[in-house]
Structures are given as C-alpha cells and as structure tokens.
Amino acid sequence: LDSLLGADTSRRLHAVGLTWSSAAESTASAVWQALTDHGVENVIAVSDVEAAEMLALGIAEVAGHERVVVYVAEPGESVLVAVTPDGVTADRRHTAALVDAQLPAADAVVVLGSGAVAGAMAALQQRTDAPVVSADQSELALARGAALASASAVALLDVADRSAGRRLSATAVLASVLAAAIVTLVVSVSAAVGLSLTPDDPTPQMARSVQE
C-alpha cells in the first residue's frame, strides 16, 4: 500500500472501492484494515453484485441504450445483470447455467471478467439475437465496478451535504469523479457495442469507512 498510495499527501483519494470473492474474505479484511491504518477515508465495501450492477448502469448510460445485459464471468461466482427501462436486476449465475438462461430483450450483451469469457460469450450467443461483445482488460471489471460504485456513493453523499434534493445522473458522476481507467473501460465497451450495432451493409448492500 505504501507504493500504491505514495508519499504525496497533497493528493486526496476521493474513494476506494473494495470488492472480493468469498475465497478472499480474509485478504479483503486485511486490506480494509491496512487502508484504515493508513488513514484512508471513504473506503466502500462493495459486493460483486453491486459492482456488476454499477458497471452495467455506466455502460448502458454511456452507450445510450435502455436495454443492456452484462455478464461478469469469474472463476468462482459470476454475475448476470440486466438493465431495462424498468430498472436493474442481477443474480449470480454460473457460466455452465447460461445455456438455459432466459435473457430479456437487449440492445447488446456485454461479457467481462477474469473467468471463462469466451465460453460465456459462446453460450450467450445461442440465447440472444443481440450482439455479444467484450472489451480489453475485462478481467478488471469487478474492481472497476467497485471503484465506480464507491466514487458514485461518495459523490452523491457530498452532493447531499451541499444541496439537499439535488440528483446527479450516472453520466455526471462519471464525468466528475471517476479515474481515467474506469472511464476507459466503460467507454471502450460502449464503443464496442456501438460498432456491433452499426451494420456494414446499410440494408441488413454498501458499508462506508470514514476516519473520524
């Protein structure tokens, strides 16, 4: 953490999103304690489902689509998220179970994660007529989703403190508080979705840690 946080105390971290698999719970606890010992504020614990949901919302809004399905394939538990005009639904779904998945109508299906992305894409292509795409550095999807969720949570809390009742859209939060790497992932996926939707033939539960 010393090398990650650096010695420059003039730079304040806006938020830190911490997510983990069930197998890494003890490691996550140690990281949380280490961040606390370093005096880092706004450490947000984000579940894998919350991280996937926030990433899916960011992709949908930046891509400009009302209906997007995002599958985050991980070696352990994977998450399937659907963004529709009615809201966001998410559940854990093993890649092997995708062959029987009932997907909602979608403008695009995005597959990310550090697990069997290719296998998940192949399975989902059999379940939908929508384009199925992925993106570079997709193995960091949950980490970046956690960063997005934590940054959004802190930004909204800050706004609530300054102006009760004012709301920020996901786009405003993305533009105002996110690191370039997170924006890059969301925009790269959105670009892939846009390219896939453009035919070649024109006729075809969070917890916040704050130092007191």
Image: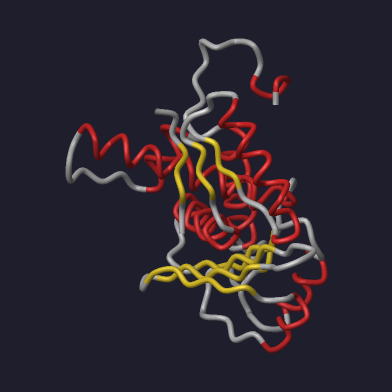
Position of residue 10 relative to residue 130, above or below, is: above
Going by the image, does 83 lie left or right of 114? left
Q: Pick the quarter of the image with the N terminus.
A: top right
Location of residue 96 in the rendering, given as x and y in whole percent from the top left corner:
78, 80
Instruction: Specify the color scheme.
Output: secondary structure
Residue nearest the observer in this picture, 113 or 7:
7
The residue at 33%/42% (across/down) is 156
Q: Quadrant of residue 99?
A: bottom right
The residue at 48%/72% (across/down) is 89
Location of residue 109 in the rendering, given as x and y in whole percent from the top left corner:
62, 68
The residue at 66%/51% (across/down) is 141
Residue nearest the observer in this picture, 198 or 61:
61
Going by the image, does 60 lie left or right of 101? left
Position of residue 47 relative to residue 166, above or below, is: below
Position of residue 27 relative to residue 67, above or below, is: above
Q: Pick the quarter of the image with the C terminus.
A: top left
Location of residue 52 in the rendering, given as x and y in whole percent from the top left corner:
57, 59
Most distant residue in the left direction: 164
Location of residue 166 in the rendering, given as x and y in whole percent from the top left corner:
21, 43
Count of numbered circles on the image: 0
Going by the image, does 122 lie left or right of 147? right
Residue nearest the observer in this picture, 174 or 197:
174
Going by the image, does 23 lie left or right of 211? right
